[in-house]
Amino acid sequence: MRVLLAGIIARYPLGGVTWCSLMYLLGLRALGHEVFYIEDTGECIYDPEQNTRALDPSYGLRYIDAALRPHGLGDAWSFVNYDGSYHGVSRERVAEYARTADLFVNLSGGAWFWRDEYASIPRRVFIDSDPAFTQLSIAKNDEWYVKFFRGFTHLFTFGSNIGTNGCTVPTGDFSWQKTWQPVVTSLWRSDEAPQRNRYTSVMSWTIESFTDVGGNKDIEFLRFLDLPARAGPRFELAVNGPQRFLQQHGWSTLPAMDISRTPGGYRDFIRSSRGEFGIAKHTYVATRCGWFSDRTECYLAAGRPAIVQDTAWTRHLPSGEGLLAFGTAEEAAEAIARVDADYAHHAACASDIAREHFEAATVLSSLIERVS
């Protein structure tokens, strides 16, 4: 099968975002499929060297190539700038590939245009990594947005409860199927002991998108602000938020970009951590949509226990050993103590959960079967 995958590697040139697209590409290729990466958001890239959105896509182009070339994909990508110019592979070659493609996968809005070459591909899949936000935006009934989603033959979401009675998110006449972010666990596995005796996370305090339909992590985090007073100075956050404010409440912090500038730096940070302490966006929690973090999956794949806020993902995934859910600060502190009491056991369970539930071969084989 020939797959054209649209992602947002250059638009958001951050380690975690890059791994999301990369693991789809590598996972599909390992299953025997041919893959090609396209990025066509109509937006300017974020350039961290200038700390601004840039009209010149040079940083993003270098970043895409540096991410894909080591994996043998250096000649299998194209970036469409906001002005319609193609970089990497030409538009003609993209159109030629699309003419014989079997599957178009749009991950997280990697393309916001129905160009003829995309629309002609027989199977067209959207992967929703922002459950609840996406559906609430559709429910606003903006004509172009609704029409855009009607162009897909299949819709998938990381919100495992979307469309069920236990979730308050409206879906209208759209049908969403559950999936997880695939993880190539062999790329994350680490036999080394963690270098940091801290539970860490990589997080955005707020995001710039969907501001009119939902709430961010800043709302939820305030409920757990005094957790270091309960559990001790056990936490280190790579955050693009109010670092001094967090430090005043006992959180160790560092700028998120310091560890997210490259895929390798992001992976090294996760591998060096004792485990994850993760807060979810308010909308995920309030709607009980069942969102589960791709970042958490990477911690688990690295053999690092994860202590993460419950969005009702516990209806679908095990909790208690290796992966522990919490809803209150008291539960979070208790989970930290449980992991500390038998760290080796929880680390082994973390690896087992990653292989059983998130291994790319399993997740992607299921997705392919459902769209074929």
Image (spheres, rainbow, N blue to C red):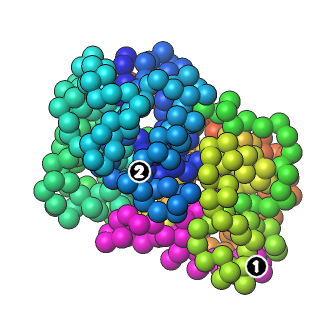
Secondary structure beneath label 2: loop
Query: What residue do we see at 48% from left, 33% from top?
Result: 24
Residue 362: tell me if it is visible: no
Displayed quadrant of residue 267: top right
Q: Are marks 1 and 2 in contact (CB under 8 Å)?
A: no
Q: Residue beneath label 1, please?
A: 250
Secondary structure beneath label 1: loop
Residue 310, x across and y down, in percent: 55, 61
- Position above or below: 149 against 222: above
Residue 124, x across and y down, in percent: 27, 32
Q: Earlier in the sequence, mark 1 or mark 2?
A: 2
Question: Would you say residue 46 sits in the magenta stretch?
Answer: no
Stretch of the chain drawn in magenta: 202-231
Numbered badge on residue 31: none
Numbered badge on residue 56: 2
Residue 141, x across and y down, in percent: 16, 61
Displayed quadrant of residue 178: top left
Query: What residue do we see at 46% from left, 56% from top?
Result: 46
Q: Residues within 10 Å of mark 1 (few under 14, many from 20)?
A: some
**Residue closest to the eye, 150 or 258:** 258
Report the amino acid beneath label 2.
Answer: Asp
Q: Rounded to the nearest whole Å, what is the CA distance between mark 1 and mark 2?
A: 40 Å
